[in-house]
Amino acid sequence: MGALGTDAVINEPNSPMLLLAQQSFGSVGATITVFMLIASMVLIIQTAFFGSARAMESMAKEENLPAIFGKTNIHGTPVFEMVVTALFNMALIMLKSPAAVLAASAIGYICANGISLFAYVKVYSDKRFRSLPREFKAPSGWKIIALICALINIPLYLVGITYLNALDSGWSSTLVGLGVLLLYIPLWFYTQRLVSKNQQNHVIKSKAA
């Protein structure tokens, strides 16, 4: 993607793996490779699909999304989250802008990495969180490493990937991608408002009892 650019990848009808298989193994090998490529693509889609649903469930349980996204069926499967993920992906497809989807995913990936690293530094530095029980504790030196990596991701990588997306796909697609990511901010504030309201109701009920 970085070498050829978004347009070159989108306009290329054949996978280089298919051409390589045809030259190496003939037509039979090329046919087998087609099925293998389809299977691998399905597995990649399923991994991202189920991973997104589980991530939404986890965020809801941590009160970073509305509680409705934390529900599961009797088998513990986040069906509602899977439906929402599918509808959201279909909405992205309806944008008819693969470059915007790529921009959103790339920028979102950088933000997720940077924020998680800053969160680690915060937890390690704050006495309120440092004493909490955890299954794994990194050595003390990793705080500095995490802070350096966080500062590299945000703002350096974030500015860089935004600028590269703008050069490669144009500012319109990049701004659409940023807009998709920024939709989470009002949703988070709405979630915190619901959480605060539920806590107040719980206190009122406790005093009344």
Image (cartoon, helix red, strand yellow):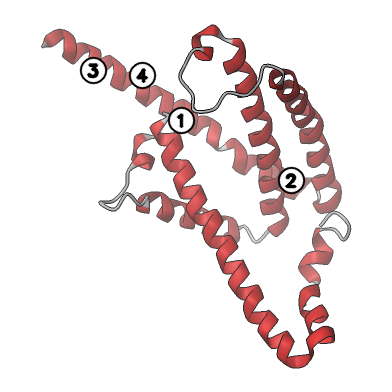
Q: CA distance from mark 1 to mark 4?
A: 12 Å
Which part of the image, by quadrant, shows the N terminus? bottom right
Q: CA distance from mark 2 to mark 1?
A: 25 Å
Residue at the left extreme, as displayed: 209
**Tag 2 secondary structure:** helix
Q: Is residue 209 above or below residue 178?
A: above
Q: Is residue 148 above or below residue 107?
A: above
**Tag 1 secondary structure:** loop
Residue that badge 2 annotates: 174
Q: Is residue 11 above or below residue 25?
A: above
Residue that badge 3 annotates: 202
- Amino acid type of the residue tagged 2 in the rendering: Thr
Q: CA distance from mark 1 to mark 3?
A: 19 Å
- Amino acid type of the residue tagged 1 in the rendering: Asn
Q: Nearer the viewer, residue 125 or 176?
A: 125
Disc with the residue nearer the chain's start (4 vs 3)? 4
Residue that badge 1 annotates: 64
- Amino acid type of the residue tagged 3 in the rendering: His
Q: CA distance from mark 2 to mark 4?
A: 35 Å
Q: Nearer the viewer, mark 3 or mark 2?
A: 3
Q: Nearer the viewer, mark 2 or mark 1?
A: 1
